[in-house]
Image: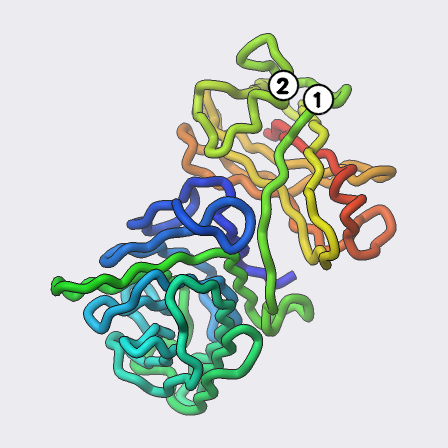
Amino acid sequence: MTRVWSEGFEMRDLVGYSVVGTYITGTARSGSVALYVPRGQYLGKSITAISEFYIRFGLYVVAYSTNNPIYMSWNKGSTRLGCVYVSNGGYLTASVGTGFSATSTGTNRLSSSTWYLVEVHVLISDTGNIDVKLDGRTDITYSGDTKPGADTTVDAIRMANEDYGTSGTALSIFDDIGLNDTAGGVDDSWCGDGRIIVIKPNSDTATLDLTPSAAVGHYTLVDDIPADGDTTYVEGSVDDEEDIYDLEACGLGDVIITRIWTEARAKDTASSGKNVALITKASGGAEVSGGDVALAGSYTVKVLGAEELVNPVDSAAWEVADIDALQGGPRTRP
């Protein structure tokens, strides 16, 4: 599986990002929240180094300015190898190197206060590519040198508004991010459209091994968004104990469901080097455990469960009824 990054900001925090100068609020493309980026701020995401990738994101331009370009860049360390930015005229523009020198400019003007789907394909090479789609239609096709220096791979993505220290009104909102590399035969090309929502625990099952912080339903202690830290929680000190919860109905209709995953915030209260895994259980099937995730002594770890592209019970595509019957929860691990 080659999906490198999926994010809809539905957890309403920025845990797990290497560089953060942003906050979450405002208009959402899907779900209830998105990432709002004012001038001079950005979101940075570290990734395993790759030379070619496909990224998708929803973009809502509140305002644009030549002094404060809105952009998505690909970096090696602190060095920007290139970016796609919104020009002062409102056109998507591809740029190679650290600045905002147009390599190729699209022909479709972006209106303010409108959601757009932006997809970008980048190959880092002396004879590379930058291809951009806007709402599914080709807007930029560039072939040429995309390797401005010696770096042949990228290891960070940035969503940003540049601040040149001059007056400007550039503001943007990002949502529904997907990033694919080109390995593995799955998720190895254009991401296509996608919308990310969250469904929360809404009742307990019979499997409740963990200790609640209060004498109430366990699920009520883990359904806070954003997570409330040490205010409400469940905990365990014995390996391989778990809580499993029913999840609320997803509220979806005529959709294609391409992937699910579990996500949580957790910490190691005893600094004992313990792990946690997240479980899903489809109706009629066995529990599916994600990989062990090492915890820190604070809520600074984004705990992700297994990403499942199909229902493991029948190996068929997920259906709305499958999601509405889904269960999940945490398992303590050594």
Residue at (65% x, 42% y) in the render: 290
Height in image: 52 above or below 257? below
- Quickly name the residue at label 1: 204
Q: Amino acid at mark 2?
A: His
Q: How many badges with numbers are in the image?
A: 2
Q: Residue furthest left?
A: 166
* Rendering coords of residue 114 (x, y %): 44, 64
Q: Foreground: 283 or 77?
A: 283
Nearer to me, 159 or 300: 159
Q: Secondary structure at mark 1?
A: strand
User: Residue at coordinates 41% horizontally, 64% vertically from top-left?
Assistant: 155
* Rendered location of residue 211, percent (x, y): 60, 14
> Badge 2: few (under 14), some or many (20 or more) residues near its Cα, within 10 Å?
many
Residue at image x 69%, y 27%? 245
Q: Position of residue 302 (x, y in %)?
A: 49, 41
The three-letter code of the residue at mark 1 reads Asp
321 w.r.t. 81: above or below: above
State how far apart marks 2 and 1 are (Cα): 6 Å
The answer to whether marks 2 and 1 mark residues whose Cβ atoms lie closer than 8 Å is: yes
Badge 2 marks a residue whose secondary structure is helix
Q: Would residue 119 be visible to someone looking at this image?
A: yes
Relative vertical location of residue 39 with respect to residue 327 in this rendering, above or below: below
The image shows residue 259, relative to residue 119, as above or below, that is above
Q: Is residue 291 visible?
A: no
What residue is pinned by disc 2? 218
Q: Is residue 64 left or right of residue 295?
A: left
